[in-house]
């Protein structure tokens, strides 16, 4: 375990290329003050790269389906006219909050190797805290179990993790729970909650 003292760690900023639709409001928000585009069709979505919560404007005549994946990059878009901006967790609709966990799990499972690599390469954040300990359900004992197992042989899949460490019955679900914690901006950012390992830290408001 590397004991070098490290400051808060966040992933390198990457532009979202694709997003999963969490909610589609064909007539816009009921409360028009939630968006300057009140009254127009709007979608709430989550990016597939860093789980960025987004507000999207669909192209005219396009109907979006919940849990659809849409392209939002700089190239030609089939369904999305414009990325309106980022969303705070508090501004998600009731439907978006219900769909959020399903979308995150689908993203994690679709990018399994990326998150298995986290279990293989996660390092210490400070002399007292390892990044593995940021995952809900992993304490000191399980942290050392993971480190010992990966030193013997790197993990190959979520199934491999569970096979070699039966106490970790749902490693994908553990990642999902951590992502949800990072997205929930209502959480007090202290201790383990001040770190962002899978998402981008929200911008601090200007004074």
Image (spheres, rainbow, N blue to C red):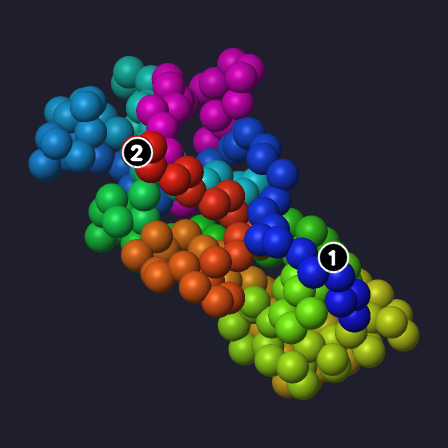
Calculate the distance from the C-alpha at mark 1 to the C-alpha at mark 2. Answer: 39 Å
Residue 51 visible, this orientation:
no
Number of other residues with Cα within 10 Å of mark 1, as a class: few under 14, some 14 to 19, many 20 or more: some
The tag on residue 200 is none
Q: Position of residue 6 (x, y in %)?
A: 67, 56
| Residue 56 x/y as whole percent | 34, 28
Q: Tell me the element at label 1.
A: helix
- Tell me where the magenta segment starts and ends, as one range: 64-86
**x%, y% of residue 15?**
55, 29
The residue under the point 45% across, 19% down is 78
Q: Quadrant of residue 175?
A: bottom right
Queried whether the magenta region covers residue 83, the answer comes back as: yes
Question: Which SS class for mark 2?
Answer: loop
Q: What residue is disc 1 on?
A: 117
Q: Nearer the viewer, residue 77 or 89?
A: 89
Q: Quadrant of the C terminus?
A: top left
Q: Residue at x 45, y 40 (%)?
A: 52
Q: From the viewer's perspective, is 121 left or right of 180?
A: right
Q: Which comes before the other along the chain, label 1 or label 2?
A: 1
Label 2: few (<14), some (14–19) or many (≥20) C-alpha neighbours in 10 Å? few
Residue behind mark 2:
207
* Numbered circles on residues, count: 2
If the image is split into quadrants, where does the N terminus sit?
bottom right
Residue 34, percent from left and from top = 17, 34
Disc 1 vs disc 2: Cβ atoms closer than 8 Å?
Answer: no
- Where 162 sits versus 118, above or below? below
User: Which residue does the image show at 56% across and 68% down from the upper left?
Assistant: 135
Where on the picture, by quarter, is residue 164?
Answer: bottom right
């Amino acid at each position: 375990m590397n004991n070098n003292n490290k400051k808060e760690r966040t992933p390198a900023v990457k532009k979202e290329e694709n997003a999963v639709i969490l909610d589609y409001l064909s007539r816009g928000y009921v409360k028009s003050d939630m968006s300057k585009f009140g009254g127009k069709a709007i979608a709430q979505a989550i990016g597939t790269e860093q789980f960025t919560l987004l507000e999207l404007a669909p192209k005219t005549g396009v109907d979006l389906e919940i849990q659809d994946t849409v392209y939002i990059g700089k190239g030609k878009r089939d369904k999305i006219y414009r990325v309106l901006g980022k969303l705070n967790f508090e501004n998600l609709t009731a439907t978006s909050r219900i769909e959020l966990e399903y979308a995150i799990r689908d993203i994690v499972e679709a990018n399994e190797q990326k998150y298995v690599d986290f279990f293989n390469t996660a390092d210490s954040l400070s002399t007292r805290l390892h990044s593995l300990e940021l995952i809900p359900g992993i304490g000191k004992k399980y942290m050392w179990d993971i480190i010992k197992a990966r030193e013997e042989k790197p993990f190959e899949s979520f199934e491999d993790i569970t096979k070699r460490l039966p106490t970790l019955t749902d490693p994908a679900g553990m990642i999902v729970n951590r992502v949800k914690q990072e997205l929930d901006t209502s959480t007090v950012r202290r201790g383990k909650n001040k770190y962002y390992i899978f998402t981008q830290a929200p911008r601090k408001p200007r004074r």
